[in-house]
């Protein structure tokens, strides 16, 4: 398939596929990243063996033509043949709510120790906070409104608003899919993902739109996936958090903000669902011990309480 180089850097080259506009999301990822071995590994990345210090992309020019297909990438000054594939969907395994609670606390502590998300590009902006609050409350309509307001918000190839949304979406989907009672979080990810990707192609950069599509489908960059595995207790959180925060100018902090918001929302929603499921079971147990009387008579206390009252009378 024909493509065009839309950006070239020492550690990465970004290629946009030439597809008709009416093709829609069926052609995602529309932007493919070709990155050096020491670069940030985005979910749409092809990783070459050479490190950035070897200048593997020095001959690639922005605006030049390229070809992607048949297991290879060809562009001016570079030819890449794919040798093996990698899966950008992190596998977290089954996760009890109590384990998620510990994982969220560990993530919070690691972020605090690493300087937190103070470098977030939308620090002080109200909409990310509103988005996090509405997600934690399971308030879909309000969450969608807040999410749509930050699509494309911020400068650069991946605006801060899109990075926050990507971190939020992928954590809602993957952590929600792993934790027991996480169905509401996955439901939120479904609807939020559909909302923010519907017109992302006209509201943000081509690269950011592709990364939103990836996140909505549960595909995470290697650095984000490592943080999610740390939340699941599969690896130490501190080094994973440091690697993520070092990504880009503000992208790492923006992604971390979204991941933390998604994990917190998933924990709260799963806890509420578990509590709601426990209450009917407890009510049924009480009914077995002391069935409610029919008619308008008030319910009588269980026999053991009547005995206690006689003993203290």
Image: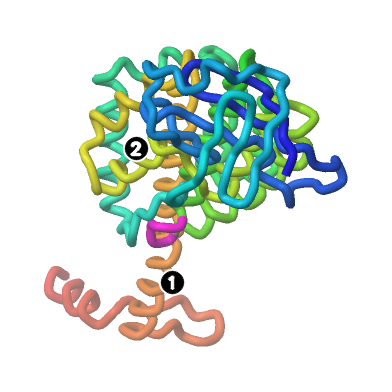
* Nearest the eye: 308 or 158: 158
The relative height of residue 271 versus residue 63 in the rendered view (above or below) is below
Does the magenta portion include 178? yes
Does the stretch in magenta take in 180? yes
Q: Position of residue 116 (x, y in %)?
A: 35, 19
* Residue beneath the point at 41% across and 36% down: 224
Q: Main secondary structure of the magenta part?
A: loop
Q: Looking at the rendered structure, which numbered label has been put on residue 227? A: 2
Seen at 30% across and 34% down, the residue is: 107
Question: What residue do we see at 43% from left, 51% from top?
Answer: 84
Near mark 2 (Cα within 10 A), the count class, few <14, some 14-19 or many ≥20, is many
Residue 174 in the image: above or below residue 285 = above
Q: CA distance from mark 1 to mark 2?
A: 36 Å
Q: Which mark is residue 38?
A: none
Q: Which residues are the magenta region?
A: 177-181
Relative to 52, 25 lies left or right: right
* Residue 253 visible in image: no
In primary-sequence order, the first of circles 1 and 2 is: 2
304 and 222: which one is in front?
Answer: 222
Residue at 51% x, 59% y is 183
Question: Relative to residue 221, is residue 11 depicted above or below?
Answer: above
Residue 52 appears at what percent x and percent y?
40, 20
User: Can you tell which quarter of the image residue 257 is in?
Assistant: top left
What is the secondary structure assignment of the residue under circle 1?
helix
Q: Which residue is identified by label 1?
A: 280
| Pair 1/2: label in front | 2
């Amino acid at each position: 398939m024909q493509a065009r180089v839309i950006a070239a850097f020492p550690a990465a080259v970004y290629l946009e596929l030439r597809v008709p506009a009416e093709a829609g999301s069926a052609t995602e990822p529309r932007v493919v990243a070709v990155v050096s071995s020491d670069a940030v590994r985005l979910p749409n990345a092809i990783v070459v063996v050479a490190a950035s210090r070897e200048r593997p992309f020095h001959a690639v020019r922005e605006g030049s033509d390229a070809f992607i297909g048949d297991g290879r990438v060809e562009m001016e000054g570079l030819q890449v043949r794919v040798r093996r594939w990698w899966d950008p969907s992190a596998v977290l395994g089954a996760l009890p709510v109590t384990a998620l609670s510990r994982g969220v606390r560990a993530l919070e502590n690691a972020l605090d120790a690493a300087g937190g998300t103070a470098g977030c590009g939308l620090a002080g902006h109200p909409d990310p906070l509103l988005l996090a609050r509405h997600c934690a409350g399971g308030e879909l309509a309000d969450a969608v409104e807040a999410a749509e307001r930050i699509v494309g918000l911020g400068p650069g190839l991946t605006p801060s608003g899109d990075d926050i949304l990507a971190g939020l979406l992928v954590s809602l989907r993957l952590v929600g899919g792993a934790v027991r009672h996480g169905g509401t979080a996955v439901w939120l990810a479904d609807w939020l993902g559909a909302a923010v990707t519907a017109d992302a192609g006209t509201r943000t950069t081509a690269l950011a739109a592709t990364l939103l599509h990836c996140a909505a489908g549960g595909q995470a960059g290697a650095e984000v996936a490592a943080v999610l595995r740390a939340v699941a207790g599969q690896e130490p959180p501190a080094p994973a958090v440091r690697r993520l925060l070092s990504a880009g100018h503000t992208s790492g902090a923006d992604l971390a903000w979204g991941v933390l918001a998604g994990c917190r929302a998933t924990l709260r929603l799963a806890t509420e669902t578990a509590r709601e499921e426990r209450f009917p079971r407890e009510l049924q147990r009480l009914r077995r011990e002391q069935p409610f009387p029919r008619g308008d008579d008030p319910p009588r206390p269980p026999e053991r309480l009547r005995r206690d009252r006689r003993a203290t009378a």
